[in-house]
Every structure is written in structure tokens, then in C-alpha cells.
Image (spheres, grey):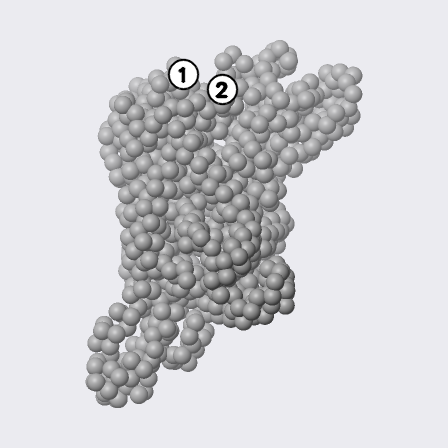
Amino acid sequence: MQKAQTLTPRRGGLERQRARIALWLLVPTLLAIALVAGYPLFNTIYLSFTDANLGSPEAPRGVGLSNYWTPDGLGILQDPAWWNSVVNTLKFTVSSVVLEFLLGLGIALVINSKFPGRGLMRAAILVPWAIPTVVSAQMWKWMYNDQFGVINDLLFRLNLIDAPINWIANPDLALWSIVAVDVWKTTPFVALLLLAGLQAIPSDIYEAADVDGASRFTQFWRLTLPLLVPTILVTLIFRTLDALRVFDVVYVMNGYAETSISMSAYARQQLIDFQALGAGSAVSVLIFLVIMIFTVFYVTSLRVRFD
Amino acid sequence: MKALKALGILTVTALIGQAAAVQVSISCGAVGAELEFCKKAADEWAKKTGNTVRIVQTPNDTNDRLALYQQNLSAKSSDIDVYQLDVIWPGLLGQHFVDLKGKIPQSEINAHFEAIIKNNTVNGKLIAMPWFTDAGLLYYRKDLLEKYGYKNPPTTWAQLSQMATKIQAGERKNNRNFQGYVFQGKSYEGLTCNALEWIYSYGGGTIVDSSGKVTINNPRAVQALKDAASWIGKTAPRGVTTYAEEEARGLFQAGNAAFMRNWPYAWGLAQGDDSKIKDKIGVAPLPKGSGAQGRHAATLGGWQLGVSIYSKNQKEAIDLVRYLTSAAVQKDRAINGSYNPTIKALYRDKDVTTAVPFMGDLYDVFTSAVARPSGPTKGKYNQVSSAFYGAVYNVLSGRSQPEAALKSLETNLNRIKGRGW
Amino acid sequence: MSTSPSVPPHQPAARRRTKPGKLIGNLLFWLVVIIILFYVLFPFYWAIVTSLKLPSQLFDTPVAYWPERPTLGNYAQVFTGQPFSRNLINSLVVAVGTVVISLLLAMLSAYALGRFRFRGKSMLMYIILAVSMFPQIAVLGGLYTLIRGFGLYNTWWGLMFSYLIFTLPFTVWVMTSFVRDIPAELEEAALVDGATPLQTLFKVLLPVMMPSLVTTGLLAFITAWNEFLFALTFTADNTARTVPVAISLFSGASQFELPWAAIMAASVVVTVPLIVLVLIFQRNIVSGLTAGAVKG
């Protein structure tokens, strides 16, 4: 390689050579992504137009759109159970994201103030985040137990209830009980992101506001929140996309029960439990479309910059 | 005992041809006692025949086991020669298994329960031999029945409700958590077993009949679900809709319930040394439904052994199946592991009935056990079951009324059936 | 990440408060802190307490908030009655393997994306970002058939391979933002000395990238260690079954037993190493999480 005094981009030959090197550096990653994401996605889309079945050794046959919709009502889009899972997922997403945001903001504001033991507090809220979702689901399932669970016991001791509540069995409570687990597990993550945003706000603007005699509340409302908006947006979108594809917490807490089944759980039930690779792939494609629409919205609305 | 074993060994040795030694692989129990028993008997067979046996570890969970089996079978893999099959799988996996009719003497086949043999027969092929059976049983507290002046366990669901109400009211005075009746009400396969028992005991059929027609939407079935739903929050805890086998057993074994529906396995544990109710329990057939068509009903559970058509050692594999399902081995498993035999004669065997009393008393329960409709619905049984327990769950948890639930279940099942099972 | 604290809302410097008001404010503040800590830590405390009770004590009512005769029997049962040590090894191998593969590939890509100019770079970054948003379920069917076709079902390789779908985009994305912050002089000096790009990367940039490697590696490790859906679908038995799946399928000695005490013991065993890791590296983790999200 020639001696280059500088790396100014106007040296065409070098520029082209650098671009070629960059491409070679990228090849392994691109291959891997094509293999684990590109091909399976393509395959899933293809399978969704066939009658593929895991149980039968025969090659799948094309069935057009009938996994999605048929004149005699056998398609996924005509299955009330699918729409039930969509409604559950939307309820779960909206409520968990809103709660996590409000609680997370509160916790972030608390940690952002100086008090003894602040470092410990920050460490403590990382605990739920580090615990595997499956483990937290099992822990809460045990706490929710109607006869021997600690939650009912606490409520008994506080004289708040006189008969045990069946958190997961009660159709009106099942989904909210699962939301509570997700909130417990994920609020710390939200709090950390918001905390980083808070700490990036220069402190001198508060000093100026103090001099002007603005009340604490006004300062929060007029200064902190507007400056935090980009962080809030990113956090909300990340969480929304995560919540839309929720699977483990729902599955471990309540299996495929109708009261709480999510879109992803419904898809897995079709794919694996019912062996209906075709119909299950159709469900997967639908979920993919929903999430991609959100993602495109995210990338364009935030105008993510790369340089 | 020794004599019987020797006899078994003799007959088996006589049966075995002069084939060269091969390795036969078998997939059976995943954990604990189940695995130990399988290993023990398989090793005996290996010693007798000079062949070797390899035990393939399988997951405990039925769904996972099924996934593994299906992967193996659809890949036509010869890794596993002998498969342990759930009673609801023959329709699903039958195409991959050897027809044992003619390969095992008819007299030996006839020694097993007819219902199970019928269940294991797909398109006229006997694809697996029964190994052990399960049926739903009613467990009750002898001491409490006596305390409240009852001589016998209930014979109808209405009686069960009355007794449970009375005992519960009395026991609640000093135990806030006492429940009249617990069963498996969680939204899963176990609820299918429970609800099939209710509906069948009222004469409401088996969800889908043997010809593949959806029969669930009938007045007897509606009545059965109405009565079952009326227990919730009265004699059964509201939380029963989250209970699987273990949750029910935990409550019963802690002395907090008068009655429980469960499988035979609970006997050994409830009679264990750390059990609060040791020697205070009795086992009876599940109650009858109301009306002229009322009868006792117990859902058929249990496991079979079949030989894969992709096996390279079919002859030896069939021989292993024949040995494992033989009277001698089943007897040993019944006495030492309380696995219910599938051979009729063993229920009259003194050694067995002494070790596990209810096996003798409840012979009729096991012979008349009702099969889930896995035969007629073939590969779609999982979907049928899931739709069924989902609908029953909705009724139990008060989300829907029995009439409406069964009507929409009928529609749904016909949707799943599509253009044929 | 800036560590300059913003002006705390509760500093004594807040001069416009009367004394009793301030006292009540402080009390309220500490009450909030205590409530938060209780909410965050109690479930974990409860898992530990449960895991120290005898299985029969679990069904005692009223509930005991402290194990009267703490026992380690459940921990022993987890390791003797179950193939749990095998599950731990599986998890460790799969998570470490996934991290190593992801970091190797991501290092090369991050160098290219953070240090080189070429056409289509933005497009590439968009694609990588989009893949990191992929719902796992969207590729489940396709991956399942692919993994079965390659004979990777129920193997470590199958899991490592499938985990790349979420670790790789994430590590590339975060490391690119780190590489971009490395001063250009370092690389230029190496190039002037006539080093090839790969030499530059491994000899010059790698030492500087170490902190970012630790951070992204750790986050990828935690993600892989906690993953459930693929592990549930692509394993059949304990040959490759990872810890989360084992915990969700925990069984007693017979087909229907569900021992909560043992489940909690296993949960504690799995969680403690993670918590230790998180506490040691909390700064790295926080900076990694925020680099991935906020710097976008």
C-alpha cells in the first residue's frame, strides 16, 4: 500500500480501494444475516401459501391465499381466536408501555437526585432486568397462587380481601396480572434509558431557572420534559416493538389460554403444537407485517442518522 | 413372585429366535421412577436375548416429546426403534408404525383391555401394544366422610356436591382454606380429560363420534357443563381454573380438600410418609351424571409401545415390545411403581391388589375408560382438544354460558375439520 | 455517558422551602425510595425464601415470611433429581458461542461501517436496524425447517446459529457507534506505516475497542442466556436444552409433579451469576444500552 499523507476523500483510487475493503469486511456479517434472517423470512412467506404440515412426510402443495382467507371461512383472518390474540396483544402493549414509562420516569427522577445510597439503588433496579423472563414469570406465578401465594396472603393480612383472589384464573384479571409481571421486569430498563437522557441535560439551565424563581414543577414541565422528548420517543418505540412480539411471559404464566394468548403464542401454537406449518407461517407473516410497519414508522419519524 | 418371574423369563427365552445380537434403542420415561423401571426391564430383556438396549432420553413434556418424535419420524430416522406413545397419538403418528397384528400372538393381544387395543388400532393396523394405563379417579377423605356421617363415597355428581358443601362448611370453621372438591380446571389437555368425564357421564358423547361427526352440541353436554360450572366458587375454589394435577394434589395432600379428581399416580404420593393424609384416603369411581343415561366415566390415559417402520431391527424391536408389555413386567411395575397394568388378569392378582388396593376394587373403571376422540380426528386432535378445553374453560370461568359455548365450539370444530379430518 | 449530575430536586439548596415542609418532603421522598426498592426486590427475596423451605412447608397457611428451618435440600434436588447441570452447561456453551461468533463478525463490520465511506452504507445500516427489530416469530417456521434440514435440530449449533438473528444486528449497531468515536489519528498512523486493514483492526483498534467489546459481549450474553422461544422450539431434550426452557418445564419425579421449591432453587441458581455480572459491569451495561438506543 502506498504512503498516504492524509485520508482525504478526494483521492479517488484510494477511496475505491477503501470501499472494496469495507465490502470484504462486511461479507461475513451479511452472509450470516442472509442465512438466519433473510432466508428463513423468505421461506416463511413461501410456506404461508402452502399446506405444509410438520407431521406429514409429503411435500407441501401450493394453496394460494387459503391459509389467510377462504370463501367458506377456514382462513386465519376468519378465525376468532386470531383476532382474540390480536386484541390481547394490543391491550398488553398499550398498558405495559404506558405503565413502564410512567413508573420508569418516576424512578429515573428519584435516582437522578442526590441522596445517600443512590448507587445501590441504581444497582438494585437492575436486578429484575437481569433475571430471565421465564424465571420472573415462574416467580410471579408462585406469588399469584390463590391458595399458597404470598400476594393473597399479604392482602389477607392487610384485611383488604376476605376470599382469595385468583389472579391468573380470573378472566378479567389474567391479562393484567401478566402485564404486572412485565412491568416489574422491564420498568428498570426504561428507567435506565430515561436516566441517561436526564443526565445528558446540562445542569446550568436549571441554575438559570432557579435564578428566575421558577418552581420545581415548572422547571420539570418547561425544561426537563421537552429536553427529554427524543429519549422518551426512542424508549417508547423500543418498548412498543418488544411488547408487540411478547411470548415468553404469556406462555409461561398461562400457556395458550384464550384470556391472555398473544399473537406470537398463537403463531407458535399453530406452527408447533398443531403442526400446521402453512397456517402458522401465515400468522407469522401477519405479525411480521404489523411490526415492520411500526419499524418503518420509527426509522422515518426519528430520521436516524448514521454519520 | 420369583416363580412368576422365572416363568416369564422362560417363555421369553423360548420366544426368541436365533438372531445375531443387535442394538435396539428405545425411548421411554424421561425422569425419576419412570426411567428406572424402563431401564430395569429393558436390561433384563437384553440379558436374556444377548442383544443390547440403548435408552434414548426424551423430554418429559408430552408436547415436546411429540415434537421430537415427529421430527425423527418425518425424517425417516432409524435412531429410535421402539417409541413410547401417548394414548392420544395413534391417529397422529400411526402411519409411521409397524402393524403388530400377526407379529404378536393374538392370545397375548386379547389379554389387554379391549378399549386400549381399539384405541391403538388405526385403519385396521395395531400400531402399538398397551404398556400401562391411566384413568380418572375420585379421591376422598375417609375420615371426613365418617365425621360428617357418610358411609360411602358419592355415586352421582349431585351427591358429591351435597357432601362437599356440608364438609366444606363444617371444616371452614377452623380452616379458612378448606375446599370441597378440586380437579384439573386449567386451560390445557387435563381439562379435556376432566370435561370429557363430566359430559360422557351424562350421556353427552365424546365431542366427536367414531365416524368423525361433531356431536358436542347436545342437551346432555350442556347440562353437564351447567352442573360443573355451578361448583366453581361453591364447592370448588375459584382458582381451580388454574389447577393442573399437581396443584390439585398439593391442596388435597395438605389436608385442605374433601374430594379430588386425579390419576392413579396421586395414590403413591398421598400415601407417602410426609403426607398429612396418609391412610385417611379412599379411591372411588368418578360419579355418574344425572338422568336416565347417567353412568360412571373415566377418561383413558396411559402409554403404549410401538415399533417404527424405519427401524432396521424390527424383529428384535417387536420382541422387546412384547417383553416389556408382558404380564411379568407389568406386574412388577404395578407392585413397585403403581403403574396400572393393561392386562385384565393382573387386576385379580393377589400381589397387585395387596400393594395397590384400588386396582382390584376399581377394575371396572379401567375397563370402561372412555377414549378422547384422537382416533377419528387424526392429525387434528391437538386442535380439537385445544378448542374444546378452551370452550370449557370459558364456561367454568364465567365468560360464557354452556349453550352458547357449545354452539360456537361446534362451529369452531367444524371449521377445524374443514374438508375432512 | 455524561456523569455530571443535574441539579438534584431535593438539595438543601432549595431555599424557598419552610422547615416542616422540607421535612415532610424528605420523608415522602424516602418513603418513595423504600416502596420502589420493596417492589423491585421483594419477588427475588420471595424466590430465595421459597427455595429454602421444605417442599411440604410451601403449602402451609398462613404463609411464613421467613424459612423456619432453612434447608438446602431443594438445591441438592435440582442438581441430582434433574439434569440441571447439563442445562447449565448448554446455556453457557450456547451463550458464549453466540457471543464469540457475534463479536468476531461484528468487529469486522463495525470497523467497515464506522471507519470507511462507501455507497449504500446508510441502506445497510437501515437493514441491520430493521433486522434487529425482527419479531422472532416471523422466522420461526422458516428457521425450524432450515435447522431440521441441516440436521441442527436439538444441537448447540442450531441454537447459536439462530441466536445470531438478534445478537448480530445489535452488536454491529452498538459497536459501530463505539468505533465511530475512536480518534481517526490512530488508524491513520497505522495506515501510514503500511499496515493492512486487518492488521490495523486487530493490532491498533482492538485494544482501544476492548471496553466496547466487553459491553456488547455482556449484553449479547445476557440476551442469549435468557432466550426462550427458539430454545423451546429447537431443542427436544437435555442434549441441548437451555436453562430457561428447563425451568419452564421443570418436573418432579413423576409426570405431573410440579415442585415450586425446586423451581425457585433453580431460578436462584440461574439468576445469581447474572446479578453478579450486572453489578460488576453496571456502568458498561448502562452505557451499552443507551448507546444502542439513544445515540441513534
Q: Nearer the viewer, residue B343 or B418?
A: B418
Asked whether the residues under marks 2 and 1 belong to the same chain, the reply is yes
Say if C57 sits above or below B383 in the image.
below
Q: Nearer the viewer, residue C18 or B50?
A: C18
- In the picture provided, is B298 more to the left or to the right than B401? right
- For disc 2, the marked residue is B119
Q: Which residue is located at x 33 percent, y 80 percent?
A: A203
Q: Which residue is located at x 54 percent, y 37 percent?
A: C147
Say if A22 sits above or below C286 in the image.
above
Say if A211 sits above or below A162 in the image.
below
Disc number placed over residue A245 in the picture, else none: none
Q: In terms of secondary structure, where does tag 1 sit? A: loop
- For disc 1, the marked residue is B210
Q: Quadrant of residue A85?
A: top left
Q: In terms of secondary structure, where does tag 2 sit? A: helix
- In the picture provided, is B34 more to the left or to the right than C292? right
